[in-house]
Image (cartoon, rainbow, N blue to C red):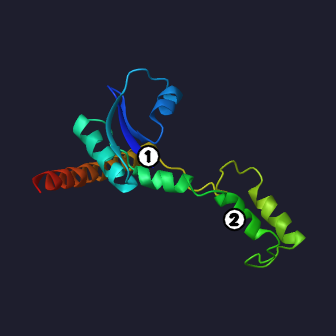
Amino acid sequence: MTYTIYHIPGIKIGVTTRPNRRMKEQRFSEWEILEVHTDIYEVSDREQELQLQYGYTVDRVPYWKIQSATQIPNRNSKISSSMKGNTNTKGIKHTEIAKANMSASQKGNTNASGNKGKKLSEETKRKISEAMKQRHAKAKHEKIQRIYTNTTTTESN
């Protein structure tokens, strides 16, 4: 199978096995083919390197991981059929009284998790938000540095 790295100027760099079809799906008329590979792992690395080189957002998940997850034929149906007839409930069955008590305890609770929890102040929410933004920025910076280091190491060899 051949994997094509394509470039849509000003938009993105991506990988596909069917470039013409992909451009029709994305409704782009101007694009260029940068590289063609036969190894899915190599094309995944090159896509991220080129995204960094061209100044685009670097994909968090490599192409090979996305493809391997979507290429397993009938995965969900196999899992579903293997569970048919399974009577192992991994625990006890709840009595009708227990079910009624659980239902009553959830009445009026609009939180999807089933636990309203403690109300946070606006200041606490702001602090949490700021901490998460810093954590994500640090992780993104470290990933870009790893890719850049791999790129420069590869070029020097």
Front-lying residue, 84 or 7? 7
Callout 2: few (<14), some (14-19), or many (20+) C-alpha neighbours within 10 Å?
few
Judge left or right: residue 151 versus residue 128. left
* Residue shown at the point (75%, 57%) measured from the top left: 106
Q: Can residue 135 be seen in this view?
A: no
* Residue shown at the point (77%, 75%) measured from the top left: 89
Q: In this view, does 19 lie above or below 145?
A: above
Would you name the residue on which mark 2 appears? 79
* Residue shown at the point (46%, 42%) measured from the top left: 17
Callout 1: few (<14), some (14-19), or many (20+) C-alpha neighbours within 10 Å?
few
Front-lying residue, 91 or 149? 149
**Quarter placement of the C terminus:** bottom left
Residue 125: mark in rendering = 1
Front-lying residue, 121 or 102? 102
Q: In this view, does 33 lie above or below 67?
A: above
Question: CB atoms at circles 1 and 2 under 8 Å apart?
Answer: no
The amino acid marked with disc number 1 is: Lys
Judge left or right: residue 52 versus residue 98. left
Q: What element carries label 1?
A: helix
Rendered location of residue 60, percent (x, y)? 38, 49
* Residue shown at the point (85%, 64%) measured from the top left: 100
Q: What element carries label 2?
A: helix
The amino acid marked with disc number 2 is: Ile
Q: From mark 1 to mark 2, how far is it between C-alphas?
A: 40 Å
Rendered location of residue 121, percent (x, y)? 47, 46
Rendered location of residue 56, percent (x, y)? 30, 36
Q: In this view, does 123 lie above or below 20?
A: below
Judge left or right: residue 150 versus residue 86. left
